[in-house]
Amino acid sequence: MSYFKSLPFYVTMGILLFVTAVYFLFRSKYEINHVNPSEVNVVNKWEMSDTLHEVSGIAYLDKTSMAAIQDEKGSIFIYNLITKNIDREIKFAENGDYEGIAMVGNKAYVLRSDAYIFEVEDITKEEPQVTKHELGLTDEYDFEGITYDKKFNRLLLAYKDENPQKDKDYKEILQFDLEQKKLLKEPVYKITYNNPLFKELRHFNTDKVFKPSEIGIHPKTGDIYILDGKTPKLLILDSNWQEKQLYVFDPKVFNQPEGLTFSPEGKIYIANEGGFSAANILHVVFGSSPVSAP
């Protein structure tokens, strides 16, 4: 009897058909079109070692170095952009889920997902003084993003999951006053899921449409940049918090964007957690104008 008429053949074909059906089912559920892919240009790329495979936040220090954190260890790593190695490790707390870092001079503010901020007094010292600030919120928020807002002397905070009212229509950007060292009640901005900017996305008008992973302020324009690491995206708002642009990234290039920082000149750097490939930092340019690599 021919193999093509035997039971093993039909079993094999059945398995292949099942796998194919599952693939297309899940692809249709999660696949989204990449918005403006030709306008997102990677100028330079740094691959991280295993130590920073879970890189979750970066902060520009100077032309040769960045501060980086990873979401499992209470350390700040000084990454050398020239040698592509870690120059120093600064231990500031026990292991935990650390998701963002913001620099104010030599002082670092590190955000932990369960609503704590660690103020690391001077990262140039071997054992800097550390102050722990409690935001007074639950870990249900799952805090992810932090940046320094020089204009108002505050930290902007972005969370991924629940908002205070358990409202399913928006997520907020919160503010931590650096003079009072406390979280202010009034949010700065609300990401609303029914915003027309999201209308082409599969999860339009649901809380899955945007899950912030990082926030930053462009030093030249004052525009606010908010990353989504779940389904890689970047939302850009102007300095008055009006929506300007939404980029949906190619996940082959942006595996899981978790970190965002700027040079003083306005160069944009995005850090991606590793998956099957190494984690990386990308120098990214939006638009087709030629630029020089750092």
Image: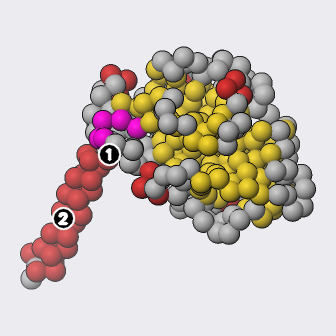
- Which residue position holds label 2? 18
Q: Which of 94 and 69 is in front in this view?
A: 94
Q: In this view, does 59 lie to the left or right of 105?
A: left
Residue placed farthest to the front in the image?
180
Q: Give the range drawn in magenta.
A: 167-171
Residue 241 visible here = yes
Where's the C terminus, which quadrant? top right
Q: Give the foreground label among 1 and 2.
A: 1
Dot 2 crowding, Cα within 10 Å, few <14, some 14–19, many 20+: few
- Give the main secondary structure of the magenta stretch: loop
Query: How many numbered circles are shown?
Result: 2
- Identified at 30% across, 35% down, the residue is 169
**Quarter of the view holding residue 132:** bottom right
Where's the N terminus, which quadrant? bottom left
- Identified at 36% across, 35% down, the residue is 170
Q: Is residue 200 magenta?
A: no
Mark 1 or mark 2, earlier in chain: 2
- Identified at 44% across, 51% down, the residue is 141
Residue 4 visible here = no
SS type, badge 2? helix
- Which residue position holds label 1? 166
